[in-house]
Image (cartoon, helix red, strand yellow):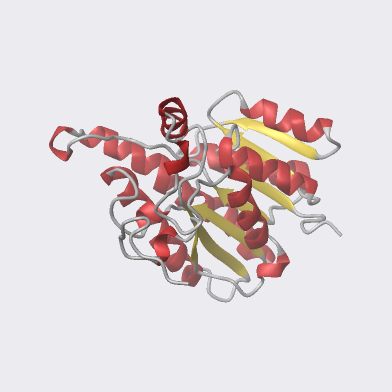
Amino acid sequence: MARLSGKKAIITGAASGIGRATATLFAREGAAVVVVDLAPEVTATADEINAAGGKAIAMQADAGEDDAIHDVVARTISEFGTVDVAYANAGIVGPVGPVFEQKAEDWLNLLRVNLVSGFLMLKHAGKHMANQGRGSIVLTASVAGLRANAGPLAYSASKAGVINMAQTASHDFLGTGVRVNAICPGLIETGMTRPTFEGARERGSEHKIGQLNPLQRGGQPNEIANMALFLASDEASYVNGQAIPVDGGLSSSLPFVPGGRRQR
């Protein structure tokens, strides 16, 4: 039986990568989905789902704008009758380079997209879910929000905020039946990380991708989508307020030199 049969879901950042993989998986598992992205390619995600016999509506919108997410939630309710699952996945890398050269306006935009977008989903989708007495809200954080050196400063700070928001918001929904959790991806091959993967392939060092985690490989979007599916489903009915790494084991260890120790 489909794990999301009859459920209605919203997924932001759904034009590519993790968002697109999650949208197509949710649809295959029985959910009707509203896919959202600022990029026009979000229509291709909906087209793929509908062509495969699923139900999808595409909305080109900015996940960090209050009115936009209000309208996304309102349309989902209008078209599908309710919202059972909301996955706030939209995100950007933001400013990189020396901290002394970064601009405050770039930080503010990063926080708007990576952090405030999750708050807006809690605010608008969460209110509807609380009123109906059930729902699952999933946020995309990162292992970069857990410890240093997994991402640039601004990006890492924003994702640490997402982790805390998932933990804290789960208590804001006390007694409502609404669950809030975050996923902390490791190094996943998406548009955001494409330069890392393509650069390694060009140099002939692809085998070094993910070398610091015990699986010694990078991840794929579908591996994050599978965790999102679990958290969205009734199988995770007692999972709440958690930030779950999906990183090949990277965050389980202190730094070490690959190959420097072997215990069998």
Q: Residue sitting at 34 percent across and 44 percent down?
A: 155
* In this view, 197 is above or below 87: above
* In this view, 138 is above or below 55: below
Relative placement, left or right, of 18 versus 120 is: right
Residue 183: x and y in percent read: 51, 57
Which is more toward the observer, 250 or 49? Answer: 250
Which is more toward the observer, 53 or 78? Answer: 53
Residue 107 falls in image quadrant? top left
Residue 235: x and y in percent read: 71, 68
Which quadrant, please, contains the N terminus? bottom right
Q: Is residue 219 visible?
A: yes
Residue 211: x and y in percent read: 42, 49
Q: Residue sitting at 69 percent across and 53 percent down?
A: 83
Relative placement, left or right, of 186 versus 79 is: left
Relative placement, left or right, of 119 versus 18 is: left
Which is more toward the observer, 51 or 86? Answer: 51
Q: Is residue 74 visible?
A: no
Please, which residue is most extreme toward the left here?
100
Q: Residue sitting at 50 percent across and 33 percent down?
A: 62
Tag count in the figure? 0
Residue 18: x and y in percent read: 57, 42
